[in-house]
Amino acid sequence: MEKSPYKTESVTLFSFFWQFARLQKWKFFLIFSLSLVWALDATLWPYLLRLIIDTFTHYDANRFAAWSALKWLLLAGFSLWVLVEFCFRTRDFLQAIALPKLEADIRMRMFDHIQHHSPKYFNENFAGSLSNKISDMTTQITSIVQNVILFIPAIATCLLSILFFIQVNGLFALILGGWITVHFIICFICTKKCVDYSNIHGEARSTLVGKIVDSFTNNFAVNLFFRFRFEKERIAHFQKEEQDKNYQSKRYIAWMFTILSIVFIVGGVVLNGFMIFYWMKGGISTGEAIQIFNTSWNVTLVIWFAGEVIPQFYQSVGIANQALTVMHAPQDVLNIPQAQSLVVNKGEIIFENVSFQYGDKMLFANKDVFIRGGEKVGLVGYSGAGKSTFVNLILRFYPLAHGRILIDGQNIAHVTLDSLRKQVTLIPQDPLLFHRSLEDNIHYGRLEASQEEVREVATYAHCDEFIRKRPQGYASLVGERGTKLSGGERQRIAIARAMLTGASILILDEATSALDSVTENYIQESLERLMQNRTSLVIAHRLSTLAKMDRILVFHQGKIVEEGNHLELMSEGGHYAQMWQMQAGGFLPDTPE
Ligand code: ADP
């Protein structure tokens, strides 16, 4: 199996974060350092206040004489104030630069990693859930950084306050230290449960959102069967579950803060009680009493914030770790290190001993197929026989379990994917289009193509006539997945897009939906032009198409059971002839019934 270019297997949340943070490490270092000024603000202010009040008391009899001492204190206070504001505002600007860049870098890396997965991965993972993972990661990493920016200064404030208190009286330091310890022990004990409740709520919420999305996606069926009430009642059931879990989680947090409030009251009463007692018996000055009162108030605020931050932090880490799982999945189809560009002259395709399985289910075993350059090959068989998988393997959408596929003698596993997809193109049965303009959708086939080339292929593919009828012409938007166009129009856009690629090998899954005869003629004519001078593989459903094929491969349960042209196969009287007899309205059947 090919290796992912990213270090995906061992990536932890921190190392993932660090890949991006190190690109701006000085900014992050400054952001965290400047945040520490909060601790100075919370502890130095009360200390200055103490000195000012003690100066007031000292010079109470001759207040004018206080100025010589006061002016320095006021200058220190003013300087501290300016310093704090300066540090905070500088930090804000740095954050304004660093966080959006961090988010953008993470988003682009995740998008790039996910986008490079094979269609198999997208079959197994919902696009909505993948894009949610990107958005979860960016918001949660920002939240983690902001939590740390709050938490580090909170711890520094606690330590500095204890130091200041030791300098006043060891007993106050002991009481404050005890109070802070009890506070954080309660926070940490409750955090686990908080996170558990919040995860349970998160699951209930995402189930609810999934049900809402499912209901909206199937809005056509809801309208058709007029099931508005049914859908509402169904959603209401999941909504009730989400509401209960949300209540459970919020109630637990409310209880945690109630316990912390009690600790605050007890801590505050004990600390301030001792402070008043010491002041009354003359053990500390009035300034020191004010310092203790003021500092303990600041510490209260700081540790309250820190207490709120801990569960948020763990929760963000949990969500971000969940989102990180998408980076753990290595891409299964990638360029090998010395991949060469595919060069196609004839367009010959060879399957050599190819085995392929979906999970444990073996579909192809030791398959050998030879398709001449320029040959037109029809693939037929009942639904589920393996026709789509066969052509997807030529496009290398899935890795082979065994064997090799050669195009003009070059193993497609050893060529660059870019060159392979330039030379082999596919028109699906019901092509989906980007919600972009008609011009952009055609242009997608070859981005370097000029506007004239786009118009030219559009004319060849019979798109130009219906595009020009639209008020905005080529600039018209096609609606999500191309819903503003009919099936036939979408097909013609896909044909024009394929023409633009200039690919030498064409794979076509014929549209089975009944197209009106005018549209069908247009499409047939466009396709015949497209198939000229190209190796063409057509998953054919129409009898008229089959008659034009050089050779027909008949698929049955992953095996090619018959091959030959229409007449040969009919004369064999086997599987193909049986399908032919079951034809309806010019189409081969999809199922044996
Ligand atoms: P056909 O194009 O002839 O209808 P397919 O190639 O789509 O057949 O499917 C062949 C078999 O492989 C079917 O049994 C189908 O259920 C199975 N299959 C197709 N795609 C997947 C997938 N992504 N994962 C697992 N099984 C799949």
Image: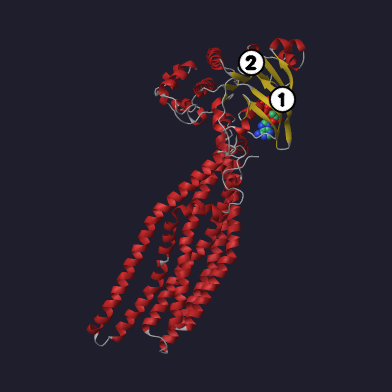
x, y (%) of residue 442? 47, 25
x 60%, y 38%: residue: 336
x, y (%) of residue 434? 49, 31
Q: Nearer the viewer, mark 2 or mark 1?
A: 1
Q: Residues within 10 Å of mark 2 (few under 14, many from 20)?
A: some
Q: In this rendering, does residue 164 appear at all? A: yes
Q: Secondary structure at mark 1?
A: strand
Q: Earlier in the sequence, mark 2 or mark 1?
A: 1
Query: Depth check: 249 or 470 in front?
Result: 470
Residue that lies at the very extreme toward the bottom in this rendered image: 281
Q: Which mark is residue 542?
A: 2
Q: CA distance from mark 2 to mark 1?
A: 26 Å
Question: Ligand 1 within 8 A of label 2's CB?
Answer: no
Q: Is residue 88 left or right of residue 189?
A: left
x, y (%) of residue 337? 58, 39
Residue that lies at the very extreme toward the left in this rendered image: 64
x 60%, y 61%: residue: 192
Q: Which mark is residue 574?
A: none
Query: Depth check: 129 or 274 in front?
Result: 129
Q: Secondary structure at mark 2?
A: loop
* Identity, as a three-letter code, of the amino acid under mark 1: Asp
x, y (%) of residue 308? 50, 62
Q: Is residue 260 left or right of residue 279?
A: right
x 49%, y 55%: residue: 143
* 151 to 265, vertically: above or below: above
Question: Ligand 1 within 8 A of label 1's CB?
Answer: no
Q: Which residue is mark 1?
A: 368
* Identity, as a three-letter code, of the amino acid under mark 2: Arg
